[in-house]
Amino acid sequence: MGEPLGNLVRTHTCGALREADVGDNVVLLGWVHRVRDLGALIFFDVRDRYGLTQVVARDDDGLLATAKRLRPEFVVAVVGPAEMRSDETVNPKLDTGTVEVAAREIRILNESARPPFQIADESPVSEDLRLRYRYLDLRRPRMQQNIRLRHQTAAAVRQFFDQHDFLEIETPVLTKSTPEGARDYLVPSRVHPGEFFALPQSPQIFKQLLMIAGMDRYFQIVRCFRDEDLRADRQPEFTQVDVEIAFANPDVVFGLIESLMQELLTAVGLGSVDVPFQRLPYAEALARYGSDKPDLRVAMAIEDVSDAFAESSFQVFRQIVADGGVIRALPVPGRGGASRKELDDFVARAGDLGAAGLVWARYAADGAVQSSVLKVAGEVAVRRALELVGVGKDDLILVAAGEGAAASKLLGQLRLEIAQKAGWLDPARFAFTWVVDFPLLEWDDADQRFAAMHHPFTSPIDADIEKLSSDPGAVRAKAYDLVLNGSEIGGGSIRIHDQAMQQRMFDLLDIGRDEARARFGFFLDALEYGTPPHGGIALGLDRIVALLAGEPSIRDVIAFPKTAAAVDLMAGAPAGVDPRQLKELRLRSDG
RNA sequence: GGGGUCGUAGUUCAGUUGGUUAGAACGCUGGCCUGUCACGCCAGAGGUCGCGAGUUCGAGUCUCGUCGGCCCCGCCA
């Protein structure tokens, strides 16, 4: 059993002691990090979340017997004077490395079982083991840093919005299933058997109600839930920075969030970023980067080279263009000298990604052109394609043909893989862009109807309103995503505040009056009572922190995350429940 | 739901064409050591090769199934 803490009070953290403290009698409380037993002299490091301090236990102080018992992760109190280290024994790797504590008393407050992996070691540990013993993983420096970064980010968010007159307002966690796309987590009501609460996928309707309520500027750091399959950047519960502003247009939202991002980068010591961010129309993002969340840390942009081949002798490409398809090309800077094998690998990779083919072209050293289709397409067409892309002598272009979105998507995928492999995606660079002008509606082939691309409360762009009846698929929305380094870190829109427009939207979505009433009647009622124009955004806090931390997965910035199979390995959740609980809820499981 | 990949000591990994007793490093245990700081030196313990079938004279190694971690597609505004 451990010794009592008694009246001992920490005088310094393990990161605090400096030369100025020499001579003070100090009390350190923390975990044994490493022990260096020299026989008649024992050094050990005490660790807390602030740092490490070396303690020395000597025979003449009668502490060797106690010090000999110390093992990693024991919890100890060390009492003694802070002493100067001699010049030869200073440890420049430690902030506290010029001093040490000469123990006069060592209390073992608690022993520790041998940990399943070493805390005092940065070496890799399999992720399932880390998750099973998350409380130990969280003691390691990397996770301590990540969790601190997350706190700093959240604190900066709160400070920023407070300074801009926003109110943080909590919204219900037990709520009603809303019309958004994701599957809901449901919570059975005991009081109303057969009825269920849903956990919010986002506080969408509540924040709009807060605008109707005159709260004017709202934000919330809020947990959201979606019962969908996981990814490195998707957890079933995740945290949004939810924002809504009355009387806002998109520029108001953009300006505010750009300032926020500047503040965040500054607050966590990662420098700053230029504003305003680029605004990239959705259609252009798809065409030029093959993605609605392009990574703009690399400039490589896809160009249309249909003109080069439309009249060429290359029958395959001519036919594709004649059938309404496109020929598009991706420049690969500096890869003009690629070997035959590298070129073959690009073609093979395109095949893996489902492409029918991939063509390459480049300038030869003598100024002639080379291409995998030089013979069939002819020098003129190949040269024209190279010119359209505007590449130089040292560059390569990869050419794909087909339906527009498919060709760009393929090249966009190659773009990312090439940039990744070449090391062009510097995690310390932060390339923001707004993606704007999303389509309002998306045709659902399976259901043969339109669905809201963002959500059914998204406002159309004023200039496109007339197309709502004539060509609904072409209507653009006042919706926008914020993209950072190829990751979607936020999305929002200006909402519909007008009942007539909202009704038109439901009609387009083929949501009948009865259905609309049943699903969100209270919200429709609210719209009738003087709803101000409003709009907002929701930012993915987990993704933002992961990018700031340079971590590939949001699991590494969440204290207690779930695995790809949506399981908490530590808590053992989900799990069966006592049959009495089910009975009380009048539920039966056939699982 | 589908595809890929990984699973060997406490941990991270190696393990040849299927062949005799499954190795290394770190950690752990014991001993020695008065200035270490990834202490050093000596000795030692430690294995259901994820699990289950199959092929084979013989399986860590090959096949099938299954469980678990990770990545991706579908899904997710």
Image (cartoon, coloured by chain):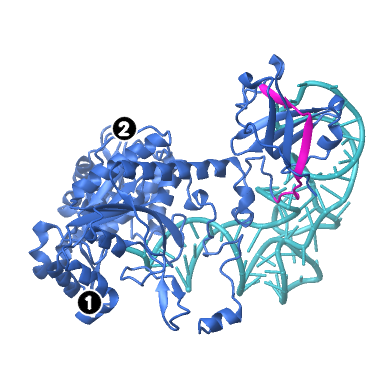
Q: Is residue A379 left or right of residue B58?
A: left
**A63 or A112, which is in the foreground?**
A63
Residue pointed to by mark 2 = A365
Q: Amino acid at mark 1?
A: Ile
Image hue for chain A: blue
Q: Amino acid at mark 2?
A: Ala
Estimate the x, y position of residue A104 in percent, counting from the top left.
78, 29
Please say whether residue A193 is visible from this viewpoint.
Answer: yes
Q: Mark 1 and 2 residues: CB-CB less than 8 Å, in contact?
A: no
Q: Which residues are magenta?
A: A99-116
How dense is the environment of label 2, judged by Cα within 10 Å: few (below 14), some, or many (20 and up)?
few
In magenta stretch: residue A576: no
Earlier-in-chain disc, 1 versus 2: 2
Q: Name the mark on residue A68.
A: none
Estimate the x, y position of residue A453 in percent, counting from the top left.
26, 64
**Separation of residues labelled 1 and 2 (CA atoms):** 63 Å
Query: Can you tell which quarter of the image residue A95 is in?
Result: top right
Estimate the x, y position of residue A473 in percent, counting from the top left.
17, 66
Please say whether residue A370 is visible from this viewpoint.
Answer: no
Give above or below for A465 relative to A193.
above
Q: Chain of mark 1?
A: A
Query: Can you tell which quarter of the image residue A170 is in?
Result: bottom left
Residue pointed to by mark 1 = A511
Q: Give the chain letter for cyan.
A: B
Question: Farthest front residue?
Answer: A7
**B36 or B62, which is in the foreground?**
B36
How dense is the environment of label 1, judged by Cα within 10 Å: few (below 14), some, or many (20 and up)?
some
